[in-house]
Image (spheres, rainbow, N blue to C red):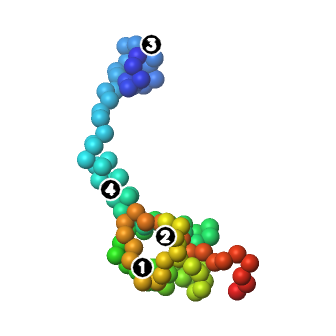
Amino acid sequence: MPQDQKPIGGDTQGGGKVDSYSAPDIDATLARASAATQKVRVVHGANEQYFDNLEGKTVGSVKKSLREVFNIPGDSQALVSSKEVGDDFILEGGMNLEFVKEAGVKG
């Protein structure tokens, strides 16, 4: 029996009804993939989350709005694609924004 068909009711000897395979909806799959690539990933320490409403916002506004939730220190550095950016940097979909604090600095 082909892998894409399985018997109904556990009958493996034949005589049982067979489910037919239906192809996935390609438009829905592409829409989900497109939506996923437009999200902005924000990381600080163990905190990580994808946001779909940060495109067009500045790093400074994201830092301010997530300061309490992600426990982001006020003097942390913002990195986009491993490069330091300022608070006025405008985010685009698909970017990774990471907040880091220099190692060995107390506070």
Q: Judge depth for marks 3 and 1 and give the one in front.
A: 1
**Residue 106, how many percent across, how many down?**
73, 84
Residue at which label 1 appears: 89
For the question of whether residue 65 can be seen, the reply is: no
Residue at which label 3 appears: 13
Residue at which label 2 appears: 80
Depth check: give the residue in front, 103 or 68: 103
**Residue 90, how many percent across, how many down?**
38, 77
Q: Secondary structure at mark 2?
A: strand
Q: Judge depth for marks 2 and 3 and give the one in front.
A: 2
Q: How far is the residue under mark 2 from the one under mark 1?
A: 9 Å
Identified by mark 3, the residue type is: Gln
Q: How far is the residue under mark 3 from the one under mark 1?
A: 64 Å
Please state if 51 lies on the left or on the right of 43 as rendered.
left
Please state if 65 lies on the left or on the right of 21 as rendered.
right
Q: How far is the residue under mark 2 from the one under mark 3?
A: 58 Å
**Residue 91, how many percent across, how many down?**
39, 73
Q: How far is the residue under mark 1 from the one under mark 4?
A: 23 Å
* Crowd around label 2: few <14 · some 14–19 · many ≥20 (10 Å): some
Residue at 53% x, 67% y is 82
Residue at 70% x, 86% y is 107
- Residue 20 figure quarter: top left
Please state if 90 lies on the left or on the right of 65 as rendered.
left
Report the disc number at residue 34.
Answer: 4
Depth check: give the residue in front, 33 or 12: 33
CB-based contact (under 8 Å), mark 3 and mark 1: no
Identified by mark 2, the residue type is: Val
Residue at 70% x, 75% y is 103
Closer to the chain start, of discs 2 and 3, is 3
